[in-house]
Amino acid sequence: MKLRLRMAVTTLAVALPLLVTLAWLNERWHRRESRDQVVVELLTRMVQGERARCEADPAHWSEQLGPGPHPMGPPPFMRGDHQRFEDRGPPPPPFDDHGPPPPPFDDHGPPPFEHGPGHQGPHARLFAYDVQLHSQNAEAPVLPESARNAAPNDGSSAMLDAPSGRERLLVKMPWSGPCAYVLAEHDTRRGELPLPPPEMLLAPVFAVLLGLFISMGPPVRRLRRLTREVHDAAQAKGRVALSSDGGDEIAELARAFSDAHNALQTEKELQEQREVALRNFLANTTHDVMVPLTALQGHLSQLLVQMRAAGASKSDEVTAAADEAHYIASLVHNLNIAAKLESGAPDLHREPVDLNELLTRAVGRHKTIAQQHEVTLERAVPPASVVALGDVTLLEQAVSNVVANAVHYNKAGGHVAAVLERLSPERFSLKVIDDGPGLDDAERARILERGFRSDAARSRFPSGQGLGLSITHEVADRHGWTLELRRSEFGGLEVELQGPCEPAKQ
């Protein structure tokens, strides 16, 4: 998971519980505020005339209390000086027969107070109780005996047990009589989720986001720096030391990368040393073997010519020995070339190569062995030299492998032709065509694989390694040439090399 996505998920994981907590606190705060509003408005209305109405007819008195504080403010005993109501004079006298009649009211009670916009206070219904918590109103809820223990003192309130979804607030009036207590009952169920207002959410959410942004900044910068250093270390050839300051997980990761890279670098250096030693050994061995082997080939060729001239009957044995010597020489050359190809060294030795001379040398090297196999080997080159860039040793061995295969796997009396031609001013074609047994489609598809040998090759040279054409293919690929194998028009195999060359001189 990316750090930005992780930050978003973390923000949600932190913000959602915070939102739920704020919603709960907001609901609790609103309920407490609503209770305070109920108490203030109730006491205000009772002092300003509702007491007289209540005591005049307690059996039918039941009011609807509107939301919000009274526009004239709280009653005297609810103000900040905390003085008792009795200290400010007696309450208004109750209504009797000699006083003016109370103002008329209907079953819905007086109209609720008007309040400013945005108020969210509750609507409560009021019921009167005496000091024993008995009400003369038949519609009033019957309070349990436990309510007496929770009954508040003068001018205070207490919450009573109520059915689910409702709330009962009992307020003690600063007098006795049938209206000594007033119960305000209202519905607490809401039709919408009690979410805090936006201005209440803005500060904590912003604080969470800011905290995450600040806390994730340094780790992100360090991870980006570590990423750059790891990329640079992948290109470096020596040992590296990544930035591992600190003792946190990022520093541990940097040290682990450094240790892993240095361990791999050590192993790589040891491997390169072993490969260099092996290539040097192989090159020295090739040189030491080829010197006497070349001499042996020369002696065998002279001996074969002399024996045939004298009509000796044992010339077949000498011919077989010459074949084996020629095969050993080719095998040693191929092993040396294969080691060079795997080391990558051929890319460092590109120079102009005259392909006319190269093909002449490759064909001349195999003339003797072709005569021994009674195979006619010819070449054809254009009058103007075809020059290509490449490693002359690798290219000559690649062409020699193709010519050697065409000679070795041909039949007595067969023919092999090596043809070099210029296809365009900047492209050439080198073909080696024979009329031998050839290869079927399945064998041609796999003959370029290293180690693969056709049935004819296995039967004629069972000790072969299958390196010749695979090396030719790899050398051609390293030089940007193409190698194609197809059935020749004479029934054998046609191997074609194509590649770029220097423009022809006018």
Image (cartoon, rainbow, N blue to C red):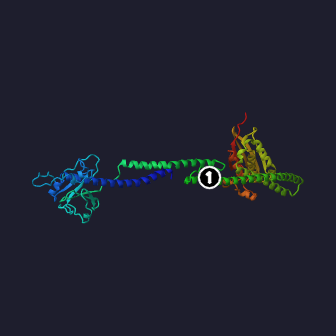
Q: Position of residue 498 (x, y in %)?
A: 69, 44
Q: Position of residue 151 (x, y in %)?
A: 25, 61
Residue furthest left as drawn: 98
Label 1 crowd (10 A; few <14 / some 14-19 / many >=20): many
Q: Residue at x 41, y 49 (%)?
A: 205
Q: Left or right: 296 with respect to 441?
A: right
Residue furthest top as drawn: 506
Question: Does the rendering let one see residue 487?
Answer: no
Q: Position of residue 329 (x, y in %)?
A: 79, 53
Q: Which residue is mark 1?
A: 258
Question: Does the rendering let one see residue 484?
Answer: yes
Q: Residue at x 28, y 48 (%)?
A: 119
Q: Kindly indicate the quadrant of the structure image that contains residue 181.
A: bottom left
Residue furthest bottom as drawn: 145
Query: Mark 1: which secondary structure?
Result: helix
Q: Quadrant of the C terminus?
A: top right
Q: Position of residue 132 (x, y in %)?
A: 20, 63
Q: Residue at x 44, y 50 (%)?
A: 208
Residue furthest right as drawn: 310
Q: Kindly indicate the quadrant of the structure image that contains residue 13.
A: bottom left
Q: Left or right: 37 with respect to 352?
A: left
Disc 1 residue type? Ser
Taking depth in this image into account, of 4 and 322 the one nearest to the observer is 4
For the image, the number of numbered tags is 1
Taking depth in this image into account, of 365 and 40 the one nearest to the observer is 40
